[in-house]
Amino acid sequence: TEYKMNKSDLGAFFGFEFLKLLRVWGSYYLVSEMKFDSPDSYQLKGTAAGGGVGLTVLPDVPINAEVKYYNMNEITSNGKTETVTGDEKQKPLEILVSIGCVF
């Protein structure tokens, strides 16, 4: 069975650019939530951290890669919230690769 997921993150971002060709950045999310459109109203809460790198290979055409690690330590299901520790934590991973262009 597939369920729709809504995700939200609130955090801080920092980045550096080197010679307009290379960019690196990092982020830390103090609050991260994933809500699933499922019969039991499944929801995950926790924190996340990520980082990325971008390279401009042609004028105004950047290629970027980013990874984000989640650490979900609060699970809500059927209205009951439980705090989990250790191996019980949900640890999703998000990978993003993008190519930009100017119109």
Image (cartoon, rainbow, N blue to C red):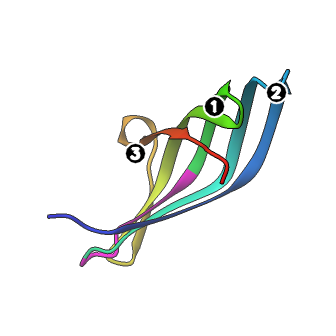
Nearer to us in this view, 6 or 97: 97
Q: Check disc 2 and report its element: helix, strand or loop.
A: loop
- Residue 34: which disc? none
- The Cα atoms of the two marked residues, 1 and 2, are separated by 15 Å
41 inside magenta stretch: yes
**How many callouts does the rendering have?**
3
Indicate whether 45 appears above or below 49: below
Q: Check disc 1 and report its element: helix, strand or loop.
A: strand
The quadrant of the rendering that contains the N terminus is bottom left
Nearer to us in this view, 17 or 12: 17
Q: Specify few, some or many for label 2: CA neighbours under 10 Å numbering under 14, 14-19, or 20 or more.
A: few
Of the image marks 1 and 2, the number of the one nearer the N terminus: 2
- The Cα atoms of the two marked residues, 3 and 1, are separated by 22 Å
- Give the residue pinned by disc 2: 20
Which stretch did the figure color magenta?
A: 39-46
The quadrant of the rendering that contains the C terminus is bottom right
Q: Residue 17's image quarter?
A: top right
Indicate whether 8 appears above or below 67: below
Of the image marks 3 and 2, the number of the one nearer the N terminus: 2
- The Cα atoms of the two marked residues, 3 and 2, are separated by 38 Å
- Give the residue pinned by disc 1: 52
Residue 64 in the image: x percent, y percent?
A: 59, 33
Q: Check disc 3 and report its element: helix, strand or loop.
A: loop
Q: Specify few, some or many for label 1: CA neighbours under 10 Å numbering under 14, 14-19, or 20 or more.
A: some
Q: Residue furthest left?
A: 1
